[in-house]
């Protein structure tokens, strides 16, 4: 029997991460990356953010968000190297680096979200 | 001959000119494609930045204040501005492709692409408002 391919699953996760990155990435970066640092809007208090993070649903959602965005990024970056720089002889190394990085990153996300007091 | 498909060593060499490594500089549309693909790096940075924020908030108020002042430093601000541009580029290209990727039938008729695009942009606006409300509604 032919080996079952992981590719369809990867494309599915890629799409899920792509949708989440498109829907939520811009506003999060706009607020925390640009508007708060430039002082155009005042950042939320520590108390408020902690209250948001304490909600289990917020943490479950944030974990899914982080993991899916990392897989999305890994998958796309893999093809950037493949198509863009035509690195085709190092496929196994590139895959390990990309998906391995996404898995490690997801584990770190799980740990950090778990540890929220 | 091997029965499996995929990469085989000693594949017959086709008469095919090798593309330049910088093929994506040849046309604006190619460059746009590779820039869209490069957004993956900035999506990954977004996650890292968010996790640093989560970590700081977990550590307490002083760590959070330190994070906020760190994010005002020029390199971080510049990186975040660049990331914002790339992630917005990702979002726009993603939603623009949505009508081709999603085929929705209602009552036996295919929903026009413009409707699907519009519903995606509406979802974008709603989630943006929701996040802003959740974070700013102190």
Image (spheres, coloured by chain):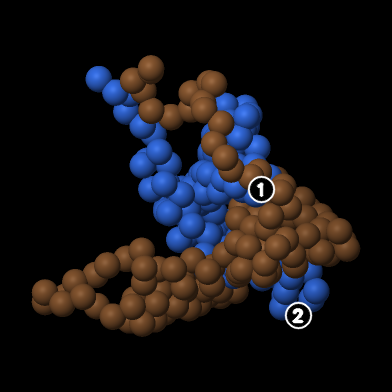
Chain colours: A blue, B brown
Looking at the picture, how far across and down is residue A90, in whole percent?
A: 63, 29
At horizontal 56% and vertical 48% (from top left) the residue drawn is A76
State whether residue B44 appears in this view.
no
Which element is circle 2 on?
loop
Looking at the picture, how far across and down is residue A50, in whole percent?
A: 59, 56
- Residue B34 lies, with reference to residue A92, above or below; the image says below
Q: Tag 1, which chain?
A: B
State whether residue B26 appears in this view.
yes
Q: Quadrant of residue B6?
A: top left
Looking at the picture, how far across and down is residue A12, in whole percent?
A: 38, 48
Residue lying farthest to the left in this orientation = B107
- Residue B109 lies, with reference to residue A53, above or below; the image says below
User: If the image is split into quadrants, where does the N terminus of chain A sit?
Assistant: top left
At horizontal 78% and vertical 60% (from top left) the residue drawn is B79
At horizontal 72% and vertical 74% (from top left) the residue drawn is A35
Q: Is residue B105 left or right of residue B86?
A: left
At horizontal 53% and vertical 21% (from top left) the residue drawn is B9
Q: CA distance from mark 2 to mark 1?
A: 47 Å
Q: Nearer the viewer, mark 2 or mark 1?
A: 1
Looking at the picture, how far across and down is residue B74, in whole percent?
A: 88, 63
Disc 2: which residue: A40
Residue lying farthest to the top in this orientation = B1
Q: Are marks 2 and 1 on the same chain?
A: no
Q: How many marks?
A: 2
Disc 1: which residue: B19
Q: Quadrant of residue B86?
A: bottom right
Dots 2 and 1: beta carbons under 8 Å?
A: no
Q: Tag 2, which chain?
A: A
Which element is circle 1 on?
loop
């Amino acid at each position: 029997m032919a080996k079952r391919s992981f590719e369809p699953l990867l494309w599915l996760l890629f799409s899920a991460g792509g949708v989440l990155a498109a829907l939520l990435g811009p506003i999060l970066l706009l607020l925390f990356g640009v508007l708060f640092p430039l002082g155009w809007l005042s950042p939320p208090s520590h108390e408020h953010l902690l209250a948001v993070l304490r909600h289990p649903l917020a943490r479950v959602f944030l974990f899914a968000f982080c993991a899916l965005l990392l897989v999305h990024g890994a998958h796309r970056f893999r093809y950037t190297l493949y198509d863009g720089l035509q690195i085709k002889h190092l496929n196994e190394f590139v895959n390990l680096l990309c998906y391995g990085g996404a898995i490690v990153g997801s584990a770190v996300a799980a740990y950090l979200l778990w540890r929220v007091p | 001959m091997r029965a499996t498909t995929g990469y085989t060593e000693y594949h017959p060499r086709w008469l095919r000119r090798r593309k330049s490594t910088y093929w994506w500089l040849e046309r604006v549309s190619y460059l746009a494609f590779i820039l869209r693909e490069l957004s993956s790096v900035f999506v990954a940075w977004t996650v890292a930045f968010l996790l640093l924020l989560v970590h700081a908030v977990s550590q307490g108020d002083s760590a959070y204040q330190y994070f906020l002042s760190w994010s005002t430093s020029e390199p971080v601000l510049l990186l975040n501005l660049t990331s914002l541009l790339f992630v917005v580029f990702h979002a726009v290209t993603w939603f623009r492709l949505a009508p081709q990727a999603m085929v929705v039938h209602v009552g036996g008729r295919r929903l026009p692409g413009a409707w699907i695009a519009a519903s995606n942009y509406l979802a974008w606006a709603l989630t943006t408002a929701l996040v802003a409300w959740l974070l700013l509604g102190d």
